[in-house]
Structure formats: C-alpha cells, structure tokens
Image (tube, grey):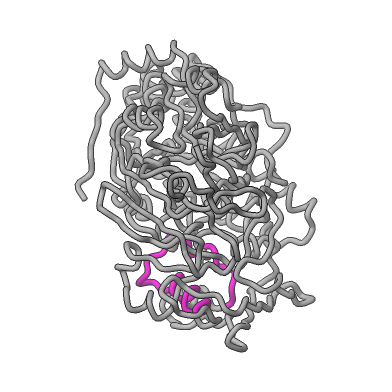
Amino acid sequence: MKPTFMRLTGALLAAAMLLLSACSKPSGTDGGPSTSSGTGQTDTGQSGSGQGGSDTSQGAQPRRGPNGEVYGGVYRMAVGAEPAGIDPHIDTTLFTYRLSRNIFSTLVRYKGETLELEPELLAEMPAISPDGRTYSFRLKEGVKFHNGAALTAHDVKYTFERLLTPATKAANTWVLQDVVGADEMLNGTATELAGLKVTGDYTFEITLKQPFGPFLYYLATAPASIYPAEYARQKGDAFAREPVGTGPFRLKEWRENELLVLERNPDFFEEGYPFLDAIEYRVVADESTRWLEFEAGNLDSNEIPTVEWENATQSGRWKVWETTTLNTYYLSLQLEMVPDPRVREAISLAIDRQKIIDTIHNGTGTPAIGFTSPGIVGALTGAPGFPYDPDRARQLIKEAGAEGMTIVSWQRGGDKVTDSNLAIQQMLAEVGLNYVVEIYDSATFREARANGEIMANQGNWYADYPDPDNYLWTYFHSSSSRGMSVAMNDPEVDRILEEARISTDQAARVKAYQDLERKLLYEQYAIIPLWHLKSYFVSQPNVYGFKLNPVFVYDYKTVWKDVQ
C-alpha cells in the first residue's frame, strides 16, 4: 500500500500555535459502562457503526440475563482505519489486540477489572514445579473453534510453534522467548518447540530456560491467543483476514476500508455470553464525521474530539467514563540516526509537557518522570522529571553543531497529523530543529519499524503485562530494541535486563530496573518519555456491562444495550 506523506508547512505551524492556546481533549477513548459513573478505557482508533437497539419485536419484552442484561442488539463503533489483519502474532496495534480479545481466547486472562490472573481456556491454573521452570496445563474440554473444530493441546502446540517459526515473521516472539527451544526455532535450526510437550489430548507442559515470574502474564496477552491448527495451517497468510478462534464473537463480514462485523458465537464455551448479537466497526477516517455520527445516535460510543470536550463532558447527554491505564506516551529517536545524546537531551528540554497536557489533553494526564508506567511495581520513583528549558536546548544544539537538523518522525495512520505532533513540531522549531512528520499506513509502518528504518516516532506503550520487563526489555534489549525504533545495542544493558527478569529477589529486581531506567533516561536520553494519560470515552446512555482492566485490552462479552 502506498504511504501517505505529509510535510508540515508554515500554515500548519500557525495552526499548531493556535491549538496550543485553545482548550482541547484527552486521547480518544471507547468502551461501555456498567453504572452511570463507572470506568472506561481508551480505545485508540476504535469506535463503530451499524444497527442499534435490542433484538425484540415491537411490544415484546426482551430476553434478559440474571442481572437484567438485555440479549440482542448491535454495538456500533467507527474507526479511523481498518487493521492490516487480525493476527496478533504479527500485528502489535491496540485495535488488533482488542479485536483479538473478542475473536480468540488465551490460556489465562485478567479477572474482571483487576490484575489477578484466572483460567480462560484452562480448567485450572497451571501447576508449577519447585524449581519454577516447568508449568503443567490442563485445558477445558468441549471448547470449540468458530469452525466447529474441538480445541485440544495440539492446537496450543501448533499456535506456539507458529509464533516462533521464522516464516511467520512474528513481531511478538517475546511471548515465548523464555521457553526451552525458542532460540532454535527462531534461528531456523529446529521445527518443533523442545520446551512444549503434549502429554494428552487436553494436557501439556511448558519448560522455561530459567525461572521467570511474569511468564503467566505473557500467556494472558493477545499474541498468546490460541489458533485452530488445521484451519490456520491451511489458510497460511490469509488467516489474518479470515481469523477463527474460540472467542465470544466470530468474524462475519469484512468489507475493505468500509466495514468490519463480528457476530455472536453461538457455541461460546462460557454459558450465557455474549449478550450482543453483533459488533460493527465502520471505517470513517474523519474525526469530525465520527463525532457527528455519535451525536446523531448512530454510534454507541466514541472518542472525544478536542473541540467537543466541554460538550461531551458537561452536557449530560451521554455517559462519560474515566479510567487510569498503564500507559506511557513517548518520543523515540533511533540511536544510530540521532547518535549525539546532546541532541536527544535538547529535544527533551524543548518539549513543554505540561502545556501539551493542558491544551491538547485537557489536563487529563501527568508529565512522565520515567518510562515504565506508574502503578507497576518497579516503575521509577523519586526522579526529578524532565524540565522545559528551551534556552538550554538551543545551547546544546549549538554545541552539537546540529542547528537546522531535520528529524523525520513517522506517524502511523490517520488522515492528518496529530495534535501532539503539531505541538512538538512547533516547540522544536523554536530551538532550531526541523521536525517533519510523515504519515504511513499501518502495514508500511510496521514493516519499517521491524527493520529499524524509522528515525523518530511519537508513540505510546500500553502495558501488555504489569512488569517493568515489558517496557525496558522491549525497548532496550538488543534482541528487540531495533524493532521499536530505538536500536539500543549495549551488552551491559542486556546483562542487567537478563539478570533482572529471572531474579527471585523482588527488592533487588526493583532496584535493578529503577537504576537502569534512571541511567537510560537521564544520562543517555535513550528514549524521551512525555506523559501518562487517563482514558476517557463517551457512550450512549443505554450502554452497560463493560469490565475494564488497567492493561487496556478488554472484550465485549459482558456488554449489553438496554431497550430505549
């Protein structure tokens, strides 16, 4: 797909300056409540369309669940762009993860709105050997995939080996990197995962190279979704557009760049769920059009556009939801392309984080003092934060001989440059740097990032699991750093991360992560943390039932719409 390029002009800079003096919004959010003052989560790039209301004939009483939930109806949302595919082995986008949570199932999942794990496809939580390396699993029996095939341990084996097979070109091999034999599969010297042993139709064991406490959290992530072996093998690359899982909804229709429809899975293994008949995602690139559709009642939930913040939150017409999620917004600078730490420090000093939070995100966030999100044990505490000092930034740029340097920042998707990128462009221009934003479709962006070709990216990271390893290993260990547009390649950093992830001494582990993060951020400026945002969305008054979680990936299994 041909990328879209957008180089910011003086007119856009003027628009950014006006923007920074106006009120605005938090990041876009989407979800549904269970009470009139419950919690919600951001749904970046997600909110949809279709037929509404409960599925009842005129005058008839709707079928209700044990707590008054209404069965039937279509949940309608709109998205700015469709995903490249629905295969969380390959795609790391939040929208794909959310689709995956509804189409697929994982061995374990988060319990409700907590960070506690519970069985999903498992009959019970796995037994762990005394040395902490071997996990024994037993699957639920009678679970069916959407195509009618029965779930067995052989599907788990196929799925995990597919993730590690080089031909898959998976972006999420970290999920199984600690399993015995993973390295051999990844380098092509083995075709089976030595550390996964099927012991029966519904039982299997996984053995790790070394003990690793967060391993079960890995298995609750979208990339650990279980696929049907025979079907996925037959479909090959086409599986991403024709996915089949065991989740509460199955793919019914996908009209390219127009509409994506999930329908109720009648054979879902959790009795009584889901309540909705279908979920419809309409592709609507323009933010204003999405809002107008929501305001007219044609969508059930929507993100809040900047200019509509007061209307959305103060009018009383809709339910407004807020939640604190595990997120960090950042500016990455590929270290080989921006090798001088003075330039990276100057960029940090040139960004007025609080001003962007106040004007673009309506005061709904806090400036970051670290990269690991607050709320995670081991996140950096007691750090001074990153000051706004444009004079010092200009001095450093001059010392580095970088006056007029161009920073090319890639933006994934959208039909216009984001407000945050506009603000950063203006601020860097004021200290003598040329910040150019180029917009690319998701597939092009993903491939370029995997190849380490992106110079800069203003992005965000929502925790896959609540541990510093998810942030620091992913972005700074040499095995994955290049693919995250950082390109850190430091044996000492690798050593610290490798030792911390297997340590059983929690206090020592926390200290190791915090010491390393302080060095990476405040001495090397290896990445530039910006802010952490609370998440907001609005929904129609008749939407209920979301079980929202701090890891920010939730399903629609419990969502329902009351009769209007």
Q: Residue furthest front?
A: 59
Residue 396 forms part of the magenta stretch = no
* Residue 83 placement, left or right of 518: left
Quadrant of res 89: bottom left
Quadrant of res 206: bottom right
Choose between 457 and 513: the one closer to the eye: 457
Residue 314, placed above or below residue 54: above
Residue 331, placed above or below residue 361: below
Which residue lies at the image location 60% right of the left edge and 83% below the top edge?
202
Q: Position of residue 251 (x, y in %)?
A: 38, 61
Q: Position of residue 463 (x, y in %)?
A: 58, 48
* Residue 370 placement, left or right of 276: right
* Residue 453 placement, left or right of 373: left
Q: Does any portion of residue 471 appear in the rendered image?
A: no
Which residue lies at the image location 52% right of the left edge and 78% below the top edge?
151
Which residue lies at the image location 55% right of the left edge and 21% below the top edge?
316
The prevailing secondary structure element of the residues shown in magenta is: helix
Choose between 377 and 414: the one closer to the eye: 414
Which residue lies at the image location 35% right of the left edge and 27% below the top edge?
292
Q: Position of residue 279 (x, y in %)?
A: 42, 50
Quadrant of res 51: top left
* Residue 400 placement, left or right of 512: left
Residue 503, placed above or below residue 344: below
Residue 160 forms part of the magenta stretch = yes
Span highlighted in magenta in the image? 155-180
Q: Position of residue 410 (x, y in %)?
A: 34, 39
